[in-house]
Amino acid sequence: MKKIIALFCLGLSFVSSAQIPSIIPIPSQAVYPTGKFSLPTSISISGPYDAQLKVGYATLVGKLKSATGRSVTLKSSGTASIQLQIVNNAKLGAEGYELQVNAKGVAIKANKYAGLFYGIQTLLQLLPKEIESKTVVKGVQWAIPYAQITDTPRFAWRGQMFDVARHFFSKEDVKKFIDDMVEYKYNLLHFHLTDDEGWRIEIKSYPNLTKKGAYNVKKEGRFTTFSKPEPNEPRTYGGFYTQEDIKELVKYGQERFVNIVPEIDVPGHSMAAVASYPELSCTPGADKYEVISGEPFIDWSHGHPEALQDNTLCPANEKVYTFLDKVMGEVASLFPYEYIHMGGDECPKNYWDKNPEILALRAREGLKNSQEVQAYFVRRLEKIITSKGKRMLGWDEILEGGGLPKGTAVMSWRGIAGGVEAAKLGHEVVMTPNNNVYVDLMQGDKAIEPPVYKTVRLADSYAFNPVPAGVDAKLVKGGQANMWSEQLFNYRHLQYMMWPRALAISESLWSPNENKNWDNFIGRVEDHMARFDVADKKYAPSMYEAIVNVSKNAKGELFVELKNEISGLQIHYSFDNSYPDHHYPTATGLVAVPKDAELMRIVSYRGNEMKGRTMNISRVELEKRAK
């Protein structure tokens, strides 16, 4: 970022840093000469017309028509307001682009159609925020700032994971998810299709997977605290994608330069499969199992998962490998991308430790423990996936037990340690550390956020660097934002959890690390929040809200320290049950809690403007935090 700003200081021909357009992710190289190109009354777009760019053209034309109300025409060649061109520039690679705006108009150049598509996304961000309107907006100066941009991605794998297993999302929701992704240059959808709460993909060899496995009892409230479903409660909540649906989604992604990686999560997280086909288990009583509806059935108090019901496929059961061979065969035929994700995470082994069939397998194969049993399972599954012409990818637990086949890629989620270990063993790695990129977790104080077990703030996501020190960067494919759906019941809440953290992650995956600058990023985030308002896209204001730390002195007196995640804000508070505004005391240092106060209210302001929401924290809660 410093290099870019320095370019603006060379002379008066460049705009000041305060006027730099708010592009996310920030481009690799960009200068912005003074001036703007005003869109003509009749806008023309020229460039190579190819089916691969059909959606790119349609997006650009559609937004220009809807928001400006002006005529927009496409032409195959000749001068135009906006010109797209395929070139041969080794510096741009397969996804890079050049974008120039001057008095003559807009020119986007790229080696491949993907680059032109990403150039279009940047062009839309250069336009006024009203370009996001679905209806004509009058009184707007429809002009584009002059720009000279050369932009290439840092990583090839720029993903978002969508868990449709815990809660089912419609085909149209998945399309909307893809549309939201590509606006910020994400190019890979990790599709979590199976779990304990649902099997979401039609497998013709095993129809019960969707006939029974795709449905459970509808529950509302907080996931994992639900009551156990009664036998008479209808199991009608859920759904699945037919194979024709999957083909449609794959095509939809390809038209937007998004590849889809399917995940079939095994051997744990498999209750929907076991409930559908109990013979895949080797635990007595599995024929009584039902698809989980969000009730507690895993005990985490030991620091590792202990199942109250066995939700695993049995590694000692040959029927399991026949099942997986047919499932992976059908999955491989539907998804053209090179990888299939096999899960492998959070597999409880307490049933395995005492199961006669698995103990016999251990003796026969010389396996020392249940971790090595899972490693045996992983090796067998890798052969199945490879036989289908695909490469295997799994969560970092697949390293446990040793012997991971060399061609297998590892997705590191329990921090970065798994990725570091995998890279040292020569495996390719996708970094998804839960401390940075788990966008289903709380993004602010638990007093105001929908409750989840942990907080990942916007600053944590922006701090994400997929290449840790000492790791061969060539082995790091990239990273992704992970959206688990235990606590997601609708798409609007999904958007709230995704944005703005996904903006931070997109910048970590696309932009050079040296271009990142927190304060500059926040300014751009606020501009994009204004765009979201126009687009009616939901997002979280959590970055404005205070970070609350509580302590207690030797006398038992409570003190609260209130900090900001971003600069330029003042935090005000009250203890008298009234609602504080910018006239109330400003929090500086430690704030003493009056001994009779029952409630603390906290609010952030920038000058006279309230930012974020009012937080309410009871004395009881403050006491808990002090402990």
Image: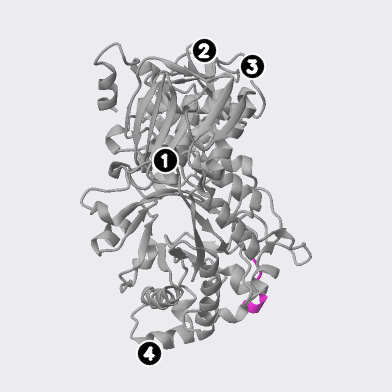
Mark 4 or mark 2: whose residue is earlier in sequence: 4
Give, as a three-letter code, the residue at label 4.
Arg
Chief SS of the magenta region: loop
Q: CA distance from mark 3 to mark 4?
A: 76 Å
- State the SS at label 3: loop
Mark 2 or mark 3: whose residue is earlier in sequence: 3
* Whole-percent x, y for residue 165 in the image: 59, 58
Task: Point out the residue furthest to the front here.
Answer: 78
* Whole-percent x, y for residue 180 in the image: 54, 41
* Whole-percent x, y for residue 296 in the image: 59, 60
Give, as a three-letter code, the residue at label 2.
His
Q: Give the mark toward the camera: 1 or 3.
A: 3
Residue 626 visible somewhere in the drawing: no
Q: CA distance from mark 1 to mark 3?
A: 32 Å
- State the SS at label 1: helix
Mark 1 or mark 4: whose residue is earlier in sequence: 4
Q: Considering only vertical position in the picture, is 504 above or below 452?
A: above
Residue at 31% x, 60% y is 428
| In the foreground, 428 or 228 | 428
Q: CA distance from mark 1 to mark 4?
A: 48 Å
| In the foreground, 34 or 202 | 34
- State the SS at label 4: helix
Residue at 27% x, 34% y is 514
Whether residues under marks 3 and 4 lie with C-beta atoms below 8 angstroms apart, the answer is no
- State the SS at label 2: loop
Query: Residue beneath label 3, please?
Result: 138
Mark 1 or mark 3: whose residue is earlier in sequence: 3
Query: Residue beneath label 2, please?
Result: 582
Where residue 323 sits, quadrant-wise, is: bottom right
